[in-house]
Amino acid sequence: MRIDLADTRAASLATAVQCVMGGLGVTLIPQSAVPVEAVRSRIELAQFAAPRPGRQIGLVFRASSKRDQAYRRLAGIIGDAIGAEQPVRPVMEGTR
């Protein structure tokens, strides 16, 4: 029986890692998931060479929110917790 790998899907990181363990290809998982999802498995781990891919995330809230100061503090806490390589900065509506 031949499995068409192009149609193989995984709904969770754990399932994706199990597929790799079963010989069904490769997967990408975030570094933060390695200790939980991959450390006990018998798979090889590799990292991208520089320049490593990345992404930007955002915390979005209404400018008129009465909690805007709390949200700004939360953004700073998140930036500190993840060791942001770039400073956390506000992006106003209509700008990028």
Image (cartoon, rainbow, N blue to C red):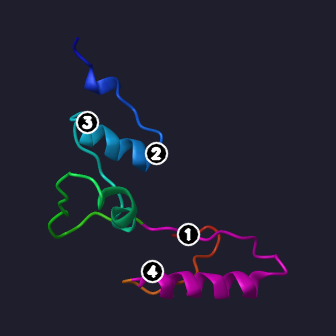
Query: In the image, which is nearer the foreground, mark 2 or mark 4?
Result: 2
Query: In the image, which is nearer the foreground, mark 1 or mark 4?
Result: 4
Please, is residue 72 above or below residue 17 in the view?
below
The magenta stretch spans which residues? 56-84
Residue 9 is left or right of residue 1, and the answer is right
Mark 2 lies on a secondary structure that is loop
Please tell me which residue lies in front, 11 or 62: 11
Q: Give the percent coordinates (x, y) of residue 4.
A: 27, 19
Question: What number of labels is visible?
Answer: 4
Query: In the image, which is nearer the foreground, mark 2 or mark 3?
Result: 3
At 23% from the left edge and 11% from the top edge, which residue is drawn?
Answer: 1
At 49% from the left edge and 88% from the top edge, which residue is drawn?
Answer: 80
Q: Earlier in the sequence, mark 4 or mark 3?
A: 3
Alpha-carbon span between mark 4 and mark 3: 32 Å
Mark 1 touching mark 4, by CB under 8 A?
no
Alpha-carbon span between mark 2 and mark 4: 22 Å
Alpha-carbon span between mark 1 and mark 4: 13 Å
Dot 1: within a 10 Å radius of its alpha carbon, few (fewer than 14), some, or many (20 or more) residues?
few
Of all residues, the one furthest to the top in this rendering is 1
> What residue does disc 4 label?
82
Query: Tag 2: residue type?
Result: Ser
Query: In the image, which is nearer the foreground, mark 4 or mark 3?
Result: 3
Query: Tag 1: residue type?
Result: Gly
Query: Tag 4: residue type?
Result: Ile
Query: In the image, which is nearer the foreground, mark 3 or mark 1?
Result: 3
> What residue does disc 3 label?
22
Please tell me which residue lies in front, 26 or 56: 26
Q: Residue 58 carries which label?
A: 1
Dot 3: within a 10 Å radius of its alpha carbon, few (fewer than 14), some, or many (20 or more) residues?
few
Q: Does the magenta stretch include residue 59?
A: yes
Of all residues, the one furthest to the right in this rendering is 66
